[in-house]
Amino acid sequence: MKVKAAVAHAPQQRLTIEQVDLEGPKAGEVLVEIKATSVCHTDAYTLSGADPEGLFPAILGHEGAGIVAEVGPEVKSLKPGDRVIPLYVPECRHCKFCLSGKTNLCQAIRKTQGQGMMPDGTSRFSVGGTRLYHYMGTSTFSNYTVVPEIALAKIREDAPLDKVCLIGCGVTTGIGAVINTAKVRVGDNVVVFGLGAVGLNVIQGARLSGANMIVGVDINPGKKAIAEKLGMTHFVNPKEVEGDLVPYLVDLTDGGADYAFECIGNVNVMRQALECCHKGWGTCVIVGVAGAGEEISTRPFQLVTGRTWKGTAFGGVKGRTDLPKIVDWYMDGKIVLDDFITQVMPIEEINTAFELMEEGKAIRSVLTF
Ligand code: NAD
Ligand code: DAO
Ligand code: ZN
C-alpha cells in the first residue's frame, strides 16, 4: 500500500513528506494506522548523526499511538480496531530477560530492531524501489507502520490518541525512572537535571511518590513555570549559580540528593548528578542518551563513599503489561499529559517541530495525519 511518511534520507537533512510503499504484515506482525505522534529528543539525536545505531534512509518516530488496521498470521493478542501504543522496548514475555523479573529490556527482537529491520531481517518500507530502514521498531512518522505484535501495548478504546501518544516514550520514561528504577520514597530529596518532557515527568513521578524537595536544574528559565506546576519545589539555573554547581546543590539539599536524575544526555552533567548525591546512599539515575563514543567519569571515591550510578531505559517499564495502567492513570486524572503538548500540527510541519524542540520552545509537538 501507499502511505504518507516523513522520510529521513541522511543525517542533518530536513525530513521530506513522501508517498512510500509499505508491505503488509507478515507472521507475528501488525499493521497500525498511526493517528498521532510526537517528536522526542532521541529522534533529533538520531537525525543529527550522533546515534551509533542511526541508519539512513529511514522513517523515524517512536512516540505514537494508533489503531490496528490488519494483523498478520499467528497474531493472537490484537485485532483490527484495537487502540495501541508502539513500543521501542518490546515485551515478548518468554525471553530470559522478560522472565528474569529484573529488567524490562526484552531481547526477543533486539538484533533486527537495531539493524532497522523487522524480525525476519527485512524492511516493510521502500520508496522508488529503495529500501527504507525502520527506526526503533516503531517508525511512527508514517500514517501507517508495521510493528511486531510483541511491540504493541493494547490500550483502552476511549483514550485520546493525540494525548496518550506521549506515553510511548517521554512520560513513561520519566515517571518510570522514579517509580521503577530509583524507587523514590516519601520524604526523599530529588534533583532533576534537564526539564524537557523526560525531566518534567521525573518531577511528576517524584511528586506522586511523595518526595520532599524536588529541585529542577535547567539552563532555560522558561522551563520553571511548568516544572513548578508539576511539583518542582526549587529551580536552579546553573548559569546563575556563583561557583561550583555541585556544592551548591549539596548545600541546598542538606547534604545531597537521595536521588538525582540526568535527563539531558550531557556527560559532564552526569558527573554533577552523581556528585550532588548524598554521601552514604545517594543514587544517580542516568536517563539522558549521550553522544556516540562519549564516556562518563568521576573519582572512584565518590562510589566508595556510598553513591550509586545506575541507568534506565523506558523507565524500566514493561510496555504491554504497564502501559494500559499508565493510560488509566491519565484517564483517571492521576497524571498530567496535556501540559506537555505545546504545539499540535500536521505531519507536513514536522521540520518545524524539530526546530522548536532544538530552540527550547517546545516540550512536545504532537503531529497528526
Ligand atoms: P529535551 O531536549 O526536551 O530536554 C532537555 C532539557 O535539558 C532542556 O530543557 C534543556 O534546556 C536542558 N539542558 C540542556 N543542557 C543543559 C545543561 N547543561 N544543564 C541543565 N539543563 C540543560 O529532551 P527530552 O525529550 O526531555 O529528552 C531528554 C534526554 O532523555 C535525551 O537525551 C533523550 O535522548 C533521553 N531519553 C532517554 C530515554 C531512556 O529511555 N533512557 C527515553 C527518552 C529520552
Ligand atoms: O536492549 O540493548 C537493548 C536496548 C533497548 C533500547 C533502549 C533504548 C533506551 C534509550 C533510548 C531512548 C529512546 C527514546
Ligand atoms: Zn522478552
Image: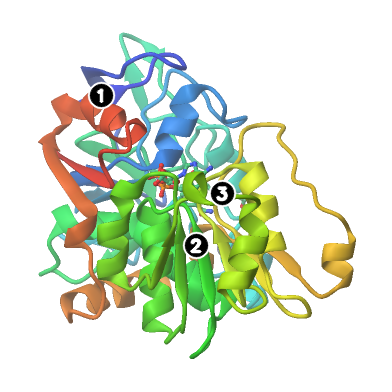
Please, what is the three-letter code of the amino acid marked with disc 3? Answer: Ile
Q: Can you give x and y, in whole percent of width and height, for residue 129 in the image?
A: 36, 10
Quadrant of image for the N terminus:
top left
Ligand 3: give its quadrant: bottom right
Numbered disc in front, either 3 or 2: 2
> Which residue in the protein does label 1 denote?
351
Mark 2 residue CB less than 8 A from any atom of ligand 1: no
Residue 321 point in image, percent of width and height: 41, 74
- Three-letter code for the amino acid on which mark 1 is drawn: Asn
Q: Which residue is mark 3?
A: 109
Q: Are marks 2 and 1 in contact (CB under 8 Å)?
A: no
Residue kind at label 2, given as amino acid type: Val
Q: Secondary structure at mark 2?
A: strand
Q: Residues within 10 Å of mark 1 (few under 14, many from 20)?
A: some
Colouring convention used in this rendered image of the protein: rainbow
266 displayed left or right of 336: right
Which residue is denoted by mark 2 in the rendering?
192
Identify the element where label 1 is drawn: helix
Label 1, label 3: how far apart the Cα atoms are: 30 Å
Q: Please tell me which of labels 1 and 3 falls first in the chain.
A: 3
Residue 102 can be seen, yes or no: yes
Q: Is mark 3 within 8 Å of ligand 3?
A: no
Q: Is residue 35 above or below residue 273?
A: above
Does 285 sit left or right of 271 as displayed? left
